Image (cartoon, helix red, strand yellow):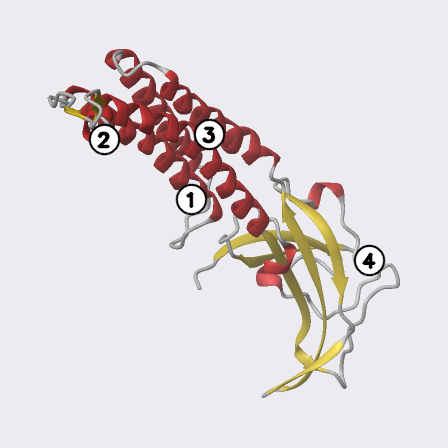
Amino acid sequence: MSKSKRKMRFYSWAATSAPYGRIPASPCPSGLYVVRSQCYFTYERYPMDKQRCKLRLQTYMYTDDVMLVSWHHSGVELYFDTRPRSFNVDDVRIAEPEVDYTLTGALSEVSFEVLLTRKVRNSVLSVFVPSFMLIFVSWLSLWVPPELVPGRMVLVITTLLTLTGLFNANVQSMPEVSYVKALDIWNLTCIVFVLFTIVEYIVVLRLSYTDSSSPQVVPEKNGKAAWTLEGRWTGKDKAALLEKGSRAFLPVAFFIFNIVYWSYYLNDSQE
């Protein structure tokens, strides 16, 4: 599974700064030490994703008989300037000190895990709400008479181009990964719904303007004339039926898609 790295910054009390996250072993009463750690994030559920970032602090080259590390009684504290702007910090889980047995010996270590939940408000205002409004505009074209070809086609094509431009603008802020994200599924589905209105209108025009058959009249036993089934279902009648069916089918289908989409991606048990 492909993953992406994100840098997190943590502050701990130790000696003076050192590169590559290695803390000098010489004791010091106090001192602010900055450690930068990379967390591997997965984006299948983006932008409704939840991430886990774990940091391990180990004695590196001193075995447990020389140095033991443990947590301060205050544990791990998060400062305001260290909080990620795109996430809410749900919880910080501190693990008990343990010993890691390696080829060089038993190394003392402590670790903690930060649980992060992405803030969805930005995506809702920039992607979900505008795309839903554009889909609603495409549905309005179903109430435009089929005879008004320029007006109806301009409305639907403009909606499709605006929707595509909206998604292209938001791609710049999305993480670059090789797999499909939740937002990609939403974008693709919205485009399919708008394309369906275009295909539906082309079929309606085809049925309306290629109907050259005339109603057939056959006499009944009592001498009165009656329309045959073929005569009643003309091309325009079929086009009108397709219009009415599309007006009901598209909103219902999009409503069902939203129920399935949001119930799946907002379900915490899928994490």
- Residue 198 % position (x, y): 29, 28
How far is mark 1 from mark 3, CA to CA?
13 Å
Identify the residue position indicated by label 1 in the image. Answer: 184
Of 28 and 149, the residue lying toward us: 149
How far is mark 1 from mark 4, CA to CA?
48 Å
- Give the number of the mark in front: 1 or 2: 2
Disc 1 element: helix
Earlier residue among tags 1 and 3: 3
Identify the residue position indicated by label 2 in the image. Answer: 229
Of 161 and 5, the residue lying toward us: 161
- Give the number of the mark in front: 1 or 4: 1
Q: How many residues crowd around disc 2 within 10 Å: few (fewer than 14), some, or many (20 or more)?
A: few
- Residue 119 % position (x, y): 63, 41
Earlier residue among tags 3 and 4: 4
Earlier residue among tags 1 and 4: 4
Earlier residue among tags 4 and 2: 4
What amino acid is labelled 1 in the image? Asp
Identify the residue position indicated by label 4 in the image. Answer: 30
Of 180 and 60, the residue lying toward us: 180
For residue 130, say whether it is visible. yes
Identify the residue position indicated by label 3 in the image. Answer: 131
- Residue 77 % position (x, y): 79, 53
Up-down relation of residue 112 to residue 166 (above or below): below
- Give the number of the mark in front: 3 or 2: 2
100 sits to left or right of 270 = right
At a point 68% along the width and 56% down the height, the residue shown is: 115
Q: How many residues crowd around disc 1 within 10 Å: few (fewer than 14), some, or many (20 or more)?
A: some
How far is mark 3 from mark 4, CA to CA?
53 Å
Earlier residue among tags 1 and 2: 1
- Residue 62 % position (x, y): 69, 80
